[in-house]
Image (cartoon, rainbow, N blue to C red):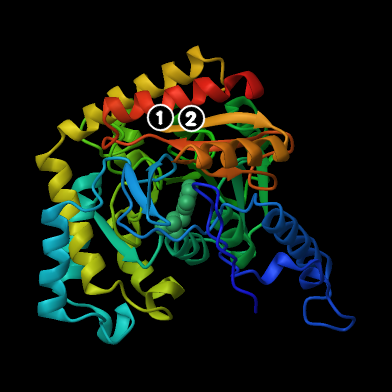
Amino acid sequence: MKRQAALSLPRQPKDPFYGFFQEETATHVPTKDLLQFNNARRWLKSIGWHSRNDYYLYQQALESKSGPEVVLNDQRFIMLSSYDYLGLIGHPAIENAAIEAVQRFGTGTGGVRLLTGTNELHRELEANIADFKGTEAAITFTSGYMANIAAITGLMNSQGLIFLDEYIHRSIIDACELAKTPYKKYRHNDTEDLERLLREAPPNRRKLIITEGIFSMDGDRCPLPEIVRLKNLYEAFLLVDEAHAFGYVGPSGRGTDEYFGIDPEEVDIWTGSLSKTIPSNGGFIAGKQQVIYYLQHGAAPFFFSSALCPAAAASINEALNVIRRESERIQHLEQNTNYLLRGLQKLGYNTGQTDSPIIPVIIGEDMNTHRLTRELFAHGIIATAVVFPAVPLRESRLRVCVTAGHRKALMDEILTVFAKLAPDYV
Ligand SMILES: Cc1ncc(COP(=O)(O)O)c(C=O)c1O
């Protein structure tokens, strides 16, 4: 395997493949090979092309903590695509909680939650999440992806019918497939289309509507009050994925229900990630006590997959306490969001319908988006490109995420670079 040659230009990306794709033959798949199928061939070709042409900017291995500024190739970069919305990565109280947890409980739990993997930290954490979210109870998993798999496979089967917003996250689609529950998609945030589907649904089916609080690729929010009204009218259940909303949406960060002034119990199941605003790893389901006790025995990821490690459980727990103590971070995030969003809009960039710190900078064609990402990188800014199939064709974009940690001087630096590049992209 060839290693990457030393590059002389400033701010070159690292080659995460150590030169593997520098020869075009690396993308050829022999007949009868394990990778002899369309999807694999397509991916290898695409990775190889981007890698050889210096456009592969994914998987850049940082040499520092993530945060508003990071180190890569011994150089300083501004991070503009982190989900650390409240700037909590590196918070001393959260780090200390993790260190103390390792010293008391070790690095692993030695088991799955149902059997021997539960310790006092998990108990405390689940009570804390339920209290924060305003539900009767909560249950945790090792990721938000797992929480969605657990919720949907645990609660639905082939007799049900699921209604999905067309922009719903991949973990939910995978969960529906795994649960063998048929699903129909309604147009993004279009409650008239959702109502049409609900009206046409066979009356004897258990119906579940699934949406996201804040949509991960567009940064807009779901019209929760209207969706709650429809779920009640058509006797459906409702699951809201708060992966990108939990911790900073609403005055105290409770989420989409707090933003709209809705009782959290109006939603049957809340799911979320603990690796975005909450600077750790993990996922949760929050809802009624009876549902949670059932899921401890009816959701496979609780008894066929390992428990959250002690460092993660303790850091999540402390992060929730920090958000309660330092709620001014939520206001800083809002101010920063307005500043950067208005700045980009003034320069003429298309930022879609965002209503949150996720600011899509919609460019359109994949190649232009990759080029802009590369130019920003050369100027010391990391902003990831999101292309088809993660977003619709010809809606490729940068997914810019602003955090409470971006100081004004940093945002001005960002806007100066975007202004310089604007003539080619707006
Ligand atoms: C809407 C949504 N749900 C679930 C997940 C999965 O969360 P996790 O990264 O904790 O697995 C993500 C991840 O980006 C997401 O955007």
Q: CA distance from mark 1 to mark 2?
A: 7 Å
Residue tagged by mark 2?
Answer: 220
Q: Quadrant of the C terminus?
A: top right
Q: For numbered disc 1, what is the local secondary structure? A: loop
Picture coordinates of residue 347 (x, y %)? 52, 15
Badge 2 element: loop
Residue 351: tell me if it is visible: no
**Residue at the spot of label 1:** 356
Confirm whether residue 266 shows in the render. Answer: yes
Q: Could you classify mark 1 by the number of other residues whose Cα lies within 10 Å: few (under 14), some (14-19), or many (20 or more)?
A: many
| Front in this rendered view, residue 381 or 116 | 381
In the image, what residue type sits under mark 1?
Answer: Ser
Q: Residue at the location (43% across, 17% down)?
A: 343
Which residue is more in the foreground, 173 or 420? 420
Dot 1 or dot 2, earlier in sequence: 2
In which quarter of the view is residue 338 placed?
top left
Of 96 and 47, the residue lying toward us: 47
| Number of residues whose C-alpha sits closer than 10 Å to that of mark 2, classed few (under 14), some (14–19) or many (20 or more) | many
- Residue furthest out toward the top: 346
- Asked whether the beta carbons under mark 1 and mark 2 sit within 8 Å of each other, the answer is yes
> What residue type is disc 2 on?
Asp
- Residue 388 appears left or right of 229: right
Residue at horizontal 69 percent and vertical 45 percent from the top: 388
Query: On the rendered image, what quadrant is the N terminus found in?
Result: bottom right
Quarter assignment of residue 82: top left
Q: Residue at x 36, y 52 (%)?
A: 71
- Tell me the tag on residue 408: none
Whether disc 2's CB lies below 8 Å from ligand 1 is answered: no
Counting from the top left corner in percent of width and height, residue 360 is at 53, 32
